[in-house]
Amino acid sequence: MRPRKRRDIAEFGDFQTPDELAREVVALFRARVPKPATIIEPSCGKGAFLAAAHEAFPDARLFGLDINASYLDVARLRLPSRCKLTLVHDSFFHFDWMRWVQDAAGPLLVLGNPPWVTNSELGGLRSDNLPAKTNVESLKGFEAVTGKANFDISEWMLMKSLEWLGVKGGALAVLCKAAVARKILSSVWKRSLPISAAALFRIDAAVHFSAAVEACLFLVEVNGTASSQSCSIYPSLQAQAPCGRFGWAEDALVSDMEAYERHKHVRGTNKTYVWRSGLKHDCAKVMELERSTGFWNGYGEKVDVEDTYLYPLVKSADIAGVRRRDREKWVIVTQCAIGEDTGPIARLAPKTWAYLNRHRAAFERRTSIIYRNKPDFSMFGVGAYSFAPWKVAISGLYKKLAFRLYGPVEGKPVMFDDTVYVLPFDNRAQAQAVLDLLDSDIAHNFLESMVFWDEKRPITVELLKRLDIARLAQRLGRSDP
C-alpha cells in the first residue's frame, strides 16, 4: 500500500480501514441490525466496508461517496460487477444527500469510518473540506468563540446520517472516536430525537490505525417509535456482554448510570459556591515568569518589573504534582475584571508597562476573537473571585479527582491558569470545611459517575457545578460551611 501523505491524513482524516477489521465489524452488526435495503458509506475510501457489506448483504443496493477519485477506482475494482453499486466522486459537504435518500429504498444502513479530524485543524490547513459554519450546539458568548466551538468533522457527518435514518429508518454502524459517539448521543438525547438502541464497542486504535485515541464501533438503531436514553458499552468487538452503560439523566451526560442512580441525591445547584476557571491570556512566554535569582520569562530574558501586578501562579501540573517544585511561577495580572482599562499600568507600574509594550507583537499574534477590540494586554477568567485569599482548586486535565487548598503566598492571593477550576473563600476555615466535603467518598462517587476519563479535559465547570455542596453537607451530617 502506498504510504499516505501527512497532509492527506490531516486534511481528510484519512485512516483507511483494514479489510479484516471491516469484516469483523460487519459480522457483528449483521446479527444486530435489521436487514438493510440500501447500504451507504459516505466516505468510502478504497471500499473495505462496501466489500464486506456486500458479502453479508448481497441483495442490498450499495452507495459509496469519496472526495478521492483514485480511491474510488480501487473500490470499484474490488466489488463484483454484478452487485448493485453506485460510486460518486464528490465531497460529503457538497452532495445533496437528502434528495438522494428520499429516493433510496429503506431501511438504510449507514456504515464506515468517517474522518478523524476537527474543523479547527482543517481551518488551520485552509481546507475547504468543511461543512457550512453553524453553531450546532447553540453555544453562547464566550463558549462559542473558544474551544467549545471546535468539533470533529465526523460529528457533523454522523448527525446528518441520523437525519437520513429519521426519514427511512435503519441503523448507523461506524468507527469513530469514543468522544465523538458520546457527543452525538448527547446531542440526540438533549433534543429528544428518537433512537431505539445504541451500543459502543471499544477497539484498539493504536493497533488498527496507529492513532493514540480512544476509539469504538458505534451502533445506533432508528425505527421511528421507541426511544432509548442509554448506551451499552462493550470492552471489545468480541465481547458478548456489556461492561457498563452511560446515558442521559437530568439534562446531563452520565458515564455510569448505575452509580449515578446511587448518588444522585447530592445533585443540585450551588448558589453560594460558584466554580470559576483560572486566567486565560494566551501569551505565556510574556505573562508567566519563573523566579530564580530574579524573574525570567519564557524567552529566557531576565525581567525587571514592579511587584504591583505580579501574583504567584499555580498551573495544572502543580496540582497534579508533575512539575518541579523548585521552579516557582508568577504571573502578570493586568486587569481586575474583564474589559477593565489597562492604561493605569503605565502610571502605577511603568517598568511593567514598558515590558509589556516591548512584547506587544506577541499579544497581537493572539488569534482568538475574544481579544478583539479589548484593552491592551487583556485577559479573561479574571474577576473579584481571582483575588480571594483562599481557594480550593482542581485541575481539569488530569485523570484524578484531586482537590487542593491554596492560601496567600507572600501576602498575595494565588492565581491559576485556565485549565484549573477554583472555589474562592475569604477565610481558611471555610475553605478547609468545603475541601473536607469534596474529599468525601460520596462527592467522589457522584462526580465519577459523570466523568469520562478519556476526554481531553475530563473535569469541567459544568460537571463540578452539579454537586450541591449544601446537600452534600446535609448528607454527611455536617453543618453547611
Image (cartoon, helix red, strand yellow):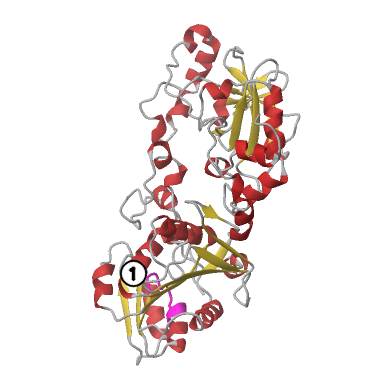
Residue that carries the numbered disc 1 in the rendered image: 166
Does the magenta-highlighted stretch encompass residue 43? Answer: yes
**What residue appears at the point 38 percent right and 37 percent down from the top-left corner?**
141
Q: Residues within 10 Å of mark 1 (few under 14, many from 20)?
A: some
Residue 62 shows in this picture: yes
Left or right: 158, with 277 as reference point: left
Left or right of residue 67: residue 320: right
Q: Position of residue 139 (x, y in %)?
A: 39, 44
Judged from the image, the secondary structure of the residue bearing numbered disc 1 is: helix
Kind of residue at badge 1: Gly
How far across and down, in percent of the image, does residue 403 sit? 68, 38
Residue located farthest toward the top when viewing the structure as drawn: 347
Foreground residue among 167 and 358: 167
Q: Where on the picture, by quarter, is residue 328? A: top right
Q: Quadrant of residue 87?
A: bottom left
Answer left or right for 377 relative to 233.
Answer: left
The magenta stretch is 41-50
| Residue 212 in sight from this viewpoint | no
Number of numbered discs = 1
